[in-house]
Amino acid sequence: MLSDADLAAIWLTLKLATTVTLLLMILGTPLAYWLAKTRSWWKGPVSALVTLPLVLPPTVLGFYLLIFMGPQGPLGQLTESLGLGTLPFTFPGLVIASLLYSLPFVVQPIQNAIEAQGQRPAEVAATLRAGPWDSFWHVTLPLAKPGLVTAAVLGFAHTVGEFGVILMIGGNIPGVTKVVSIQIYDHVEALEYTQAHWLSAAMLIFSFSVLLALYVLQRRRAAGGWRYGP
């Protein structure tokens, strides 16, 4: 039913999605916190940049990333000067592209969860002599747990389903950049519809399971089944 190439594509997809989700949670949480709390003029432009992948065609983002990370691009020249070569058509290149493309799916749920808290929890923590760092770790993050869970699930699922950006940056290298979406495309091009059906069905079941899980979690939260806080 699934060939060795299919299994390799599935493994690479899971590896990419896991790596990207971990990095996005580490990098996206402080960014979401800043966007939720700041009153700076920069909030508008930064929010627009974060949201841009939602409306920008993936091929456009992939094209400019290809130029940016290529031999003539700023990042490409930097990596080559460090003896690292260029990033396009490599797994690290896929990670960087996926980070940017999935960024809004992680930042926005966390930002919304923090904004929904209002200022009251932080003010109460301040009256108990909690510093900004303590307040962030022991008040803000626990209260934002629903947003963190949603962000992690959506970030992982969105990375699994990427195609346009992956094709532009990674191409079609088995074991290196060929993820499930590219493998399905190859099966269709080769008129191997049975194999395409199996992989497509797996993607469909996975996507449905993710949405169902989010729905159940949101229902539990609305019903008061979860408790947040330190």
Image (cartoon, rainbow, N blue to C red):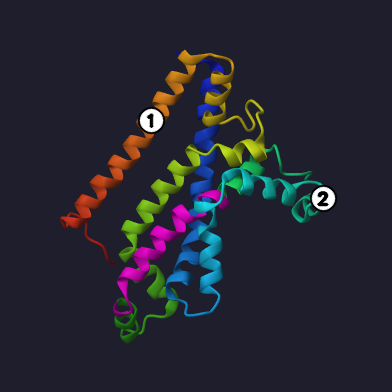
Is 216 included in the stretch rendered in magenta? no
Q: Secondary structure at mark 2?
A: loop
What residue do we see at 28% from left, 40% from top? 212
x, y percent for residue 132: 43, 78
| Residue 35 position within the rendered picture, expressed as x and y whole percent measured from the top left | 47, 70
Mark 2, residues whose alpha carbon is within 10 Å: few (<14), some, or many (≥20)?
Answer: few
Q: Which residue is nearer to you in this view: 133 or 44?
A: 44
Q: Is 204 rendered above or below residue 54?
A: above
Position of 200 relative to 103 (above/below):
above
Per the rendered image, the range of residues in magenta is 100-120
Q: Could you tell me which quadrant the C terminus lies in? A: bottom left
Going by the numbered disc 1, the residue's amino acid type is: Leu
Q: Amino acid at mark 2?
A: Gln
Which secondary structure type mostly characterizes the magenta part of the structure? helix
Q: CA distance from mark 2 to mark 1?
A: 39 Å
Look at 31% across and 86% down and name the residue there: 127
Q: Residue furthest left?
A: 223
| Element marked by disc 1 | helix
Q: Residues within 10 Å of mark 1 (few under 14, many from 20)?
A: few
Residue carrying label 1: 204
Q: Quadrant of residue 223?
A: bottom left
Check residue 114 for magenta coloring: yes
Q: Which residue is mark 2?
A: 72
Q: Is residue 184 above or below residue 226?
A: above
Picture residue at 55% right of the left edge, 14% below the top:
191
Where is residue 114 drawn, in percent x and y? Answer: 36, 68
Identify the residue shown where x is 50% and y is 42%.
159
How far across and how far down the image is residue 100, in percent? 57, 52
Query: Along the line of sight, which residue is nearer the eye, 123 or 71?
Result: 71
